[in-house]
Amino acid sequence: MAEVSAAVIEKLKGISTATISTCLYKRGLRNQYVQDVLPVGTPKSTSMVGPAFTLRYIPAREDLNGLEVFRNPEHPQRKAVETCPPGAVLVMDSRKNPRAASAGSILIGRLQARGVAGVVTDGGFRDAGDIARLDIPAFHQRPSAPTNLTLHEAIDINVPISCGDAPVFPGDIMVGDCDGVVVIPAHLAAEIADEAAEMTVFEDFVADEVSRGRSIRGLYPATDPKTLEDFQAWRKEKNR
């Protein structure tokens, strides 16, 4: 697995999931957006960015999934909370089933205390109001009160998973904002960050021009040569 530098992580914090998705699409990657997952509460002021640390659930088998399983310190859900590295994002495969919680505010509060960068499930979280008040970014389908044991059996840690129909490999870079979550393959993270950062500057220029009444014809995309001349002048003026 490619190692992603802190500088790349920091650069990605200033780039939207929309721009990243376009960069991935240009490389033929069309299924990297986590479907039906949004922030719990108000989105945080900066994007969630970090390498994926995964937890996989399977459908619960009742004779193996009683409350007593939480007494085991090696229980995969509990172990994931205590071993997810600081700066990583805990990503849960809950089979797109939000009818029982993937976790609640106590476990997510513990992740925050340990310095984890964020948490994502394609299911639901309980204690959603409490989670919304935490500083750690959290993404799910919707609130769900029942304990995860009702429907989910934690089975694997840090293996390839599906989350909201997106493939997630351990170490892939998760980026989350108000639009949701996108997954960047680790080996592409540096070049995606560079390209997306440049795209962001140009898109800021375009938004500025549109706000002044300019037509998008020849501007977006930049098919009029004057657009690039204007962009360079704008960039110099804005020190971008």
Image (spheres, grey):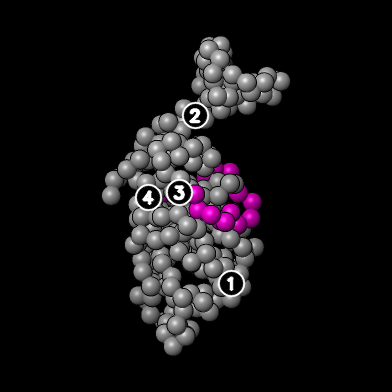
Which residue in the structure is indicated by mark 1?
99
Q: In which quarter of the image is residue 9?
A: top left
Q: What stretch is highlighted in magenta?
A: 31-50
Query: Which residue position is annotated with label 3?
Result: 32
> Do the numbered discs 4 and 2 sit on residues whose CB atoms are within 8 Å?
no
For label 4, the residue is 172
Mark 1 and mark 3 in contact? Answer it, CB < 8 Å: no
Residue at the location (56% across, 11% down)? 226
Residue at left offset 39%, top offset 61%: 161
Residue 46 part of the magenta-drawn span: yes
* Gap between marks 1 and 3 measured at Cα: 24 Å
Q: Disc number at residue 199?
A: 2
Mark pair 4, 2: CA separation: 22 Å
Mark 3 or mark 2, earlier in chain: 3
Q: What element carries label 4?
A: loop
Q: Compute the Cα span from label 4 to label 3.
A: 11 Å
